[in-house]
Amino acid sequence: MRVEFPFFEAQKEKYEAAKEANDPTKMAKASLDLLARSTNRRVRSGQVFRLETAHQGSKQEARKLSAAVQWYPQAEGIRVEVTVVDANFSINPKGLNQGSSVCLFFSPSGFDDMRTRINIAPSGAEDAPIIQAEGVESTKASWKRTSDGYHITATVPYASIKGYRKGWTFMPVDAMVNSKSPEGRCALVGGATGQPGPGQTTRYYLKLVK
């Protein structure tokens, strides 16, 4: 999945200039042009996408961790199903990324300032896993333990996704799965490189098709 770097930077420059000028019409145009031209890998409703890019941890430990993600755009929000195989299942409530957990990412504009991140840890009652998210209190999730890991179902209302636009066609999304191995944190992401969270450009997100 790729958005050509010069094009991304050009659209980002237009977007930032429109934002500085408080011109939402031009901001929306820069975003829509970016999404229309993006050649990033597309994922459709229900399509299984496997997280295979190592973000952190050794290759040996990464082989003990895997995840399959499915996004389902619905009338009021996006349901996400994540099936995780985790040989080092454990929870760290003080730092969810340092134990078994899943991070979901949404960026309707395709730009870094419009990014929503939701961390979910398979802990506690099955209908009430630990959820950490800024301003996304209405996210609903459940989880269940499996023989080799766990499964998480989460529904994120559109109203909770920063920068959401009604009538969208494409939405940049990504996911990350974490685990604590004997060597330390291990993490896999869906994007082409690096971590899809703060510090990593949305240029590498997947392109969810409504």
Image (tube, rainbow, N blue to C red):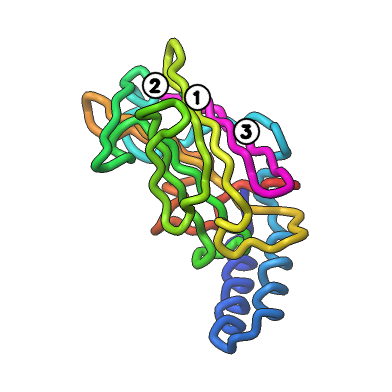
> Label 2 to label 1, Cα distance in Å?
11 Å
Percent x, y of residue 140: 52, 41
Residue 70's disc is 3
User: Crowdedness of circle 1 by 10 Å Cα count: few (<14), some, many (20+)?
Assistant: some
Percent x, y of residue 150: 45, 22
Percent x, y of residue 1: 62, 46
- The quarter of the picture where residue 147 lies is top left
Question: Mark 1 belongs to which amino acid?
Answer: His
Q: Secondary structure at mark 2?
A: strand
> Label 1 to label 3, Cα distance in Å?
12 Å
Residue 151's disc is 1
User: Crowdedness of circle 3 by 10 Å Cα count: few (<14), some, many (20+)?
Assistant: some
Q: Residue at x 72, y 37 (%)?
A: 45
State which region is magenta. 63-83
Q: Residue at x 50, y 67 (%)?
A: 113
Residue 123, magenta (yes or no): no
Residue 86's disc is 2
Q: Secondary structure at mark 1?
A: strand
